[in-house]
Amino acid sequence: MSVIGQSAPSDVDDNSASEQVVTPVVRRSGVDRIFRSVATSSGVITFILMGLIGGFLLIKGYDALKVAGWGFLTDSEWAPDQGGKFGIAAILPFTVQIAVVALFIAVPVALSTALFITEYAPRKIRRLLTAMIDLLAAVPSLIYGLWGLFYLQPRLITLSKWMANHMGWVPFFHVNDEYGTSLGIFPSSTFVAGVIVSLMVIPICTAVMREVFSQAPPGEREGAMALGGTRWGVVRDVVLPFGRGGIIGGSMLGLGRALGETIAVTLIISPAFTAKWSILDQGSNSIAALIALKFSESSSFGISALMAAGLALFIITLLVNAAASTVVSKSRSGSSTEI
Amino acid sequence: MTSIDITSTATTRMSSDISLLDPGHQAAGLTANNVSCWFGAKKVLEGVNLDMAPGQVTALIGPSGCGKSTFLRTLNRMHELVPSATLAGEILIDGVDIYRGAIPVTDVRRRIGMVFQKPNPFPAMTVAENVLAGLKLSGLKTTRSERDDLIESCLSKAGLWNEVKNRLGDPGRALSGGQQQRLCIARSLAVSPQVLLMDEPCSALDPTSTRRIEQTISEISETVTVVIVTHNMQQAQRVSNRCAFFLAAENEPGRIIEEGPTKDIFTNPRDSRTNDYVNGRFG
């Protein structure tokens, strides 16, 4: 008797020493072997690319990192070419602030849009909206930046002022009193940059969430309807639990985009190098915008410092995505459903 | 014959004219008058007249594609969920038309529950939460003790209580297929339906689970009218009081060929096609 599998059942193990556990042999056909190697090498390339980018940034930024030491994480100013200190203690928080503002707006909007498209919209509108969203995702960020700078910002700062006046008790919306009521301090702020970045993030988040929601199992939907469920009941008890992974995944994809957004932020902000809680008043920054602004005017040491900043952005994006994929893998995803 | 635009009359207004937790609720009779169905331009069902008497089990039998599942889904307005589906005729529950807005569609589906071919417990919910899902879905508030009572009584009625009473916190999907299907029956019973529609509820189950579900059907049929679609002739004979034989000739919509007491359909059918089908000569 032979037993196929990793281990033989233990109750027959003792009395029959002659039993040999068989290791199943798999013979792959030619086509299978070719496809397997193509797929494997594509997978390997992803790893290599990640390693190459990280390694490149590390090597290029090493000179600056060596000079700055831990100060790179604690210094706020940026004067590597003047022989001064430089660090990401201000630009990193600014970067995160812009991204958080963007997600704060984008996630609820994207979630509602995706639910409207999959659950409520008539079929014609559904198709039209889906196409529009995809189109919006394809608009270059420079266009968003220009439109945001010249059209949206002059209008948006009225809202900034209102928030500063009425919600100033929230630390994020607090503005120094001496300027409190003049519109002039509100442009080029973290808030404005965040709002404009949110416009770029919304289509991406929406596309991912819509895709996942539309795959909610029909069997479960019908089960919920047949119990007398309302539309909202079906959304809450079937679609949202099913789409949790997609909601998180879509948001994280948006966060990655928001953290790295360059040109629109560069156009909007006026660079600041002192971290602050307030998001409404003038002055903000981001790692990507800093690199874009300083790149052409930096010496080789200055560029090394920028590379180090880029490395910080790279690592943060990786961490965010790793965290996201952990959350997604722990929640129920579409693949675990049979229906 | 006028075709009803079912989507426009789909009222989703909440109404509280039925007490959900009322234990004294009565099985209701369903009547189909001259029901025809289309998917787009294709007519799949024509002129169906059928009385499903209160407290009785009615079996719908017939070969695949004869429209019996479609007919079943018209009985609680699930038919209209398919885009392009239309319908003519009327379905009455205790004499009230369910399609013309007299009863909100959510109430129609609550009063006329449904169990599907494939067990579909909600995977994000525990066994207990699955039983209570109908209450949550329709936004009904209940007290803790009402909920506990309901969980036990519904699971007992579905013949599942003894197997799961210590596993109420497990996910619904952790149960076996037969248990999942009984959980779905318990879930349907929790909103006190007057009618329960079953669309081949045992087709994915082993014989033991099938037997358990058939027992459940005969137990609940005192308080709930049951309409069951089945391909299993023995099952139809075991569980039903009345039987309706559906048949669709090639390129024609399905019709009821013969309808009557189950005994007559199986032992003394009037139509030769019924005789052929119940004796396994086609289908």
Image: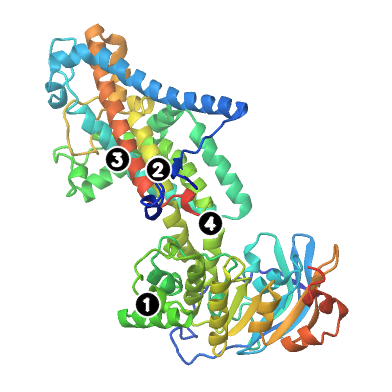
Per the image, the residue denoted by label 3 is A100
Q: Residues within 10 Å of mark 3 (few under 14, many from 20)?
A: some
Mark 4–mark 2 contact, CB under 8 Å?
Answer: no
Marks 3 and 1, how far apart in space? 37 Å
Spot occupied by residue B48 in the image (x, y as percentages of width and height) = 77, 78
Q: Is residue A231 left or right of residue A80?
A: right
Label 4 resides on the chain identified as A
Q: Residue furthest right?
A: B272
- Which element is circle 3 on? helix
The mark closer to the camera, 3 or 4, is 4
Numbered mark located on residue A249 in the image:
2
Marks 3 and 2, how far apart in space? 16 Å
Q: Nearer the viewer, residue A177 or A252?
A: A252
- Which element is circle 4 on? loop
Q: In this picture, is B279 found above or below B53?
A: above
Per the image, the residue denoted by label 1 is B141
Q: Is residue B79 left or right of residue B21?
A: right
Per the image, the residue denoted by label 4 is A217
Q: Residue furthest bottom?
A: B24
Closer to the N terminus: mark 3 or mark 2? 3
Marks 2 and 1, how far apart in space? 34 Å
